[in-house]
Image (cartoon, coloured by chain):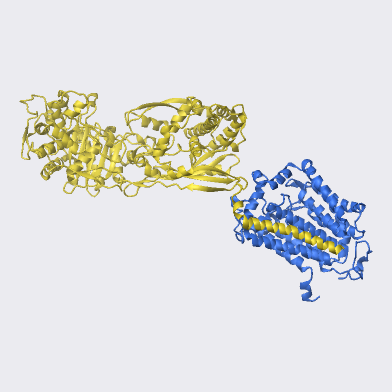
Amino acid sequence: MNLSAKLLSPSLPIVIPALLLLAAGLASIWEAAPVVLPGTGGFHAVASVALRSFFGKQCVAAGIGILLATLVSRVRPQRLRAAGYSLYGSCLGILLVLFILGRVRNGARSWFVIGPVSIQPSEFMKLFFVLTLARYLMWRRAPDRLPRLIAPALLAGVPFSIILLQPDLGTALIFPAMFVAMMWVAGIRKRHLLMGVLAVAILAPLAYAFAFKDYQKKRFQAFLNPQAMSQDAGFQLLQSQKAISSGGWLGRGWGESEQEGPEAFVPERHNDFIFSVIGEEWGLVGASAVLGLYFTLLMAMVLGAYRAREPFGRMVLTGLAAGFATQIFVNIGMTIGVAPITGITLPLLSYGGSSMVATLLSIGVAWNIASQPALTLAGKDFREGAGEVRDLGTDGWSR
Amino acid sequence: MTRLRVVVFSLILIVPFLVLEARIFQMQVLEAEEFTSRADWTRTWVEIVPTPRGRILDRNGVVLAAEERCFDLEIVFSDFEKPRVKGRDPELDYDRVAAMLRDLLALRDARAGFDVKQCAKMLRDRVYPVRPVTATDPATGKTETWTAPDVEVLQGLLGVAGSEQRRLASDLYIAAVRALRQIDRIVFKRCTIPGKPASARDRRNVVRQEWRQIYPLCQGLDYDQTAEVALDEGRFPGVEIRQRTHRVYPEGRRACHVVGYVQQPGRDERYSAREAAGEYRGEMGLAADEGDEAALREKGWYREEMREKLSAAEYERLEARDAFSRDWIGMVGIERVYDRELSGFRGVERRARHLLSRKEWVVERVAPVPGRDIRLTLDVKIQQKAEELLDNLPLGLKGSIVLIDVETGDVLALASSPGYDLNWWLRQRTAEESAYLADETLLAQFNRATGGLYPLGSVFKAVTAAAALESGAMSPADHVVCQGRYDPVKYPNRFACWIAAHGGAHGELDLRGAMARSCNCFFFAAGERVGIEKVGEMAAHFGLGRPSGIDLTGDRAGQIPGPDWRRARGGGRWGFADTLNVSIGQGEILVSPIQAARLMAGFSTGRLPVPKLRFDSPASSTDLPLSRATLDQIRAGLEAVTQQSFGTGYASALHLFKAAGKTSTAQSSSRKVGLEHHGWFAGYAPSDRPRYAFCVMVEHGGAGSGVPAKTATRLLSAVWPEVALPPELGGQILPAAHDDAGPNRGAPARPLLPEIGPDEPSDEAGGGAEPEPAEGSPR
C-alpha cells in the first residue's frame, strides 16, 4: 500500500479522532486535577507522580492502551474471533470472583485492587461480549424467530445481570444497547424489537420501585428535578450545568476553570463529569468539537461495518459503536441534564485506567477490522443473514 | 439487507448527537444566565475582623504603647461530638472537653494536673465557684461590689500548682463554662416564643446550630503555644486558632498615668457576676442591654456600612456570642481620651464555606480601619527623670511633676508617684500587684498631677500680687513693714508671718523682696487692699478653679473660695480672715499641679496656654489681662526667689538654669496626725527667655524650698543636661540601683537619708507659722 492509500485507509477516521479525544481528555484531567510536580526525588518522585496522580495514572493507562491497540490492530482477525469465547468465559469467571475478592468503590463491588493498580473487569467485558456475540451470530441463521434469540440474550444477559448485581447500573446498561444494535444488524424482526421495548417499558417502573437502591432513586429524582434535590444528588448536576453554561461560546480558556473555586465546584469532575470541564473551558466550540470527533469516530466505525463483507466484523463494529454511543450519550447527557446520573465513563476522556485500556483495545479492534473490509478468498460477499458461509479457516483472510 | 440495517443504525446514531448538541447550545448560549445563579451549596456566616490599635508615641517617636501579635483559641463544640438532646439540655462528652482543657493547659507546664472527672462534672453542671469582690474607684470614690470567679477554690478543684498555670487553668475552665452557658442562653432565648412552647425538635435544631458556632476559649497565647495546638489537631478537636494583636506597653511604668490602659469592657464582668449569682437563667429571655448597645455605637463599632451588611438577626447573634465585648477599650489616660482614634474601626466579613470542597472565601467585607497612632508631646527622657525623681523621694513621699512648654502648652513631662506597670492590666494580676493597686495609702492609679488637689500656699501670692498691682490697689513702690505679725494693732496676735515661728520679722519689704522671702504680711496687706473679689477674678484668669483643659482623664477643677462660693455651698459668712487666708494661698484653695504649672507659664509669657498632650493638636492660649509693668514686677519677684541670695529658693541652685519660680509650703490638715505640710515649687525657666514652666509637688513633703525645689533643679538638669549641678545636688538622690524590675517595682523607693535635715537653714521659706492664722481664722 502506498502512502496515499494509507492516508485514505478507512482506519484513519477511527484512529485520528481517537487520538485527538485522548489528548483532549489528558488535557482536561490535567486541568481538573493538576499535578504538583515534586521538586526533588528523581526517579522515585516521577514514579510516584505516575502512579499516584490522576494525570500520571491516566498517562500510563493511555500508553498501555495505545500499545495494546496497536498490537491488536495487527493481529489476524481470526485470532480475534478465536479468542472471543475464551476471553468472554474467563472474564465472566473473574466477574464472579469479584463478588468475593472485589473492592467496593462508589458503592459497587467492581474493582480488583493490586497495589497501586485497580482494575475494573466489567469495562473489558463489554469488548469480550461484542466479540463473542459477533462470533456466535456469525455462524447462525438470522435471529428472525424468537427461539433463535434465546442464546444471544443469554450471552448478553449473564454479564448484564452480574454487573447489575455489583451493583453498577451504568456499565450494565451498555450491554442491552450493544445487544439490541447487534441483533438489529444481524436481522432481528422489528416486531420482536418492539416487544422488547414494550417489555422494558413495563419492567422499568417495577424495577425502579423494587430493585433500585435509594441512591439510584435519588439520582433519578435529581435528574427529573435538580433544584428540589440540590442539597444532595442534584448538586453535582446543578454545579456541572452551571460550569458548562458559564463556558459560553468560546469558554473560559484552558486553565481558567473556576471549578477549583468553591463556587463552581463539580464533584468527580476529573472522572464522570469531565465533560463539564471541557464545556466550561472550551465553550460551545470545544464541546461541539468533542461531539464532532465522537461522531466522526462512530461514523467511521459504522462505515467500517457497512463496508465489512463478513458478519463478524460488521457486528463487532456495530456493537462497539452502539456501546460507545450509549456511553457518550448517557455520560454527556448527565452532565447537561438530559440523562440521569449513572456511574458511566466518557470513552477516552474520563479518568479511569480500566476504561481507558478497554476503550483503546476496542478502538484497536475496530481499527483492525475497519482496515481490512474485504474478504478476498470468499469470492463473494456475505449476503442476507450470516449462516450461509462456512468457516474458511485461517487462510480465508488476506493481509 | 444487513447493509441497509447498518445505514438505519447509523441514522439512529445521529439522533443522540443532535440532542446533545442542541442541549449544549441551549445551555451555553441561550440560557447562559439562568444556570449561573442556581444552587448554593455553601454555608455563610459573619465574622468580626479585628484591627490593631494605634500606637502611642512620645514626641521623639519612643513607643509607649504598641501592639503585639497574639493568638486566641476558639472552640466549636460540635467538632467534639454531635449534641445529644436529653430532656431539655444538650449533652456533651464533658470528659473529653475536660481532657482537652487539660491538654491545653499542659502546653504551658507539663506538671499541671487537671482532675478530669471533677472538672467534667462541674462542666456538666456549668458552674464555677465565685466570691464577692469589693473595690473602690480612687478617682470617683465609688465602692462597687460584684462577684468574680473564685480562683482560689478553682485552683483546688483543678488541682494545679503554680500561679501561672492556676490562672490559665481557671481561665480556660471559666471560658469553657461560659461558652456552654452562652449556648444555653441562646437556645433558651431562641426557643422561647411567647405563647408557643418550643418543641423538642426546634430545640434540638437550635442546639445543633449553636454548637456549630465559634466560641472564645483562650486568649492571648503566644506563638509557641499556638504552634503546639496547630500541630496537634487530633488532641484539640474543635479548637480553632485566630490571630489578632494585643496591647503591650514596652515602657512598663513609664508615663503610666498619661498613657493609661485598656481593658475589656465591664459588660462581661457584670454579666458573669449575674451568671454566677444564678440569675442568668431568668435573664436569658431578655433583650440586650440598651446601655451596652449605646456604648457600642458610641465606640464606633457599629458603622453604617455594617448596618447595611449585617442583618439584625446576625447582629444579635454576634452580640449574644459576646463578639463585641471581647474588644479592648481604653479605660483611663490617653487610651481613654483618644480611644476612638486609637481603636479604629473593626471590620466585618461575611465568609462562606463550601460544604463539599471545604474551601472558604470572603463573600463580602467591610474593611477594618486600623487605629491611628497618637504622638504625644511627652519627652520620655524628661518623663523618665521626673519619675525617677519622684520614686526616689525621701521617706517614700508621694508627689507629682509637671513640665510644660510655656508657648504651646505641650506637656513634656507629667509624672505622678507612685505609679504602676501598665502591663498589669493586660493579664490577670498577681495577688501582690492587686494589693498594691488597691492600697488606699498609695492610690497608685491616681494621677496626682491632674487630679490631685492641694492647697496651693505661697505660689498663690503671685496671683494676689497680680490682682493688687493690676487693680491699682498697690503700686510697685509700695512698701509693707513685716513685724512678724500682720497689723498687730488691729489684729493682735492673729495673723502671723511664717518667720515669727523662727523668732523674727522681715522688716520693710517691697513686692520683689516680699516675693523672694515669701513674706506673709506683705500679701496679707495686698489681699486686704485689693479685696477677695479681685483676687478671685485674677485666679480665674489664671485658670484656677476650673479644669486645665488638658486632654487627659482626671482633669479636675479644684476650687478658689470667695464669698459667693461660700454662700453657694451653704457655708457661713465670708470673713476678713478668709480673705487674708486666700491672699497667701491657704484655706480652702485647692489647685492641681498642672494648674500650678500653667499659672507659671502664664506669668512667664503673659498668655495662659492650654496644656496638651497630643502633639498634633493645635496650641491654644488666652491672653492674660495683665499690663507689661505688672508682669515685669511679678517676674522680678519670681526671679528673686531663686536668683537672689535672700530668696527662699536660692539654696536649690535653680539660678543655674536661670529659673524663676515660687516655693510654697501649704498647710495640710494632716499636720495634726504628724504629717508634714505639702511642699511645692512652681516656676519657669529660663527667666530671660522662658521656655518651660514646671511644677513639683510633694505630698507632705515639708517646706517648698527643700525637697520640691531641689527636685525641680534635678528635673531641669534633665532638660538642660549641659548645666553642671553642684556636688550636693548632683546625683545624691538618684542612685542607679533603683532601676529595679522586681515584683515590688510599684513600691516607692525609700532612700536611706532623709533629705530635710541638711536643708534646714533654707527651710524657713514656706514657714510653719502660716497654719496659725488659717486655723485661728473665724469662718
Please give the name of the residue rendered at 60% of the width and 52% of the height, measured from the top-left corner: B34
Please give the name of the residue rendered at 22% of the width and 40% of the height, measured from the top-left corner: B597
Q: Is residue B498 above or below residue A73?
A: above
Q: Is residue B356 above or below residue A378?
A: above
Looking at this view, is B534 or B664 the one in front?
A: B534
Q: Which chain appears blue?
A: A
Looking at this view, is A149 or B179 the one in front?
A: A149
User: Quadrant of residue A369 in the image?
Assistant: bottom right
Q: Position of residue B36 (x, y in %)?
A: 60, 52
Q: Position of residue A149 (x, y in %)?
A: 89, 53
Q: Position of residue A118 (x, y in %)?
A: 75, 52
Looking at this view, is B571 or A247 the one in front?
A: A247
Looking at this view, is B729 or A242 the one in front?
A: A242
Q: Is residue A75 above or below residue B628?
A: below
Q: Quadrant of the N terminus of chain B?
A: bottom right
Q: Is residue A165 above or below residue B189?
A: below
Residue A174 located left or right of residue B290: right
Residue lying furthest bottom:
A2
Residue B457 located left or right of residue B85: left
Q: Position of residue B569 (x, y in %)?
A: 22, 26
Q: Quadrant of the C terminus of chain B?
A: top left
Can residue B657 be seen at all in this image of the molecule? yes
Can residue A348 be seen at all in this image of the molecule? no
Q: Which chain appears yellow?
A: B
Residue A338 located left or right of residue B725: right
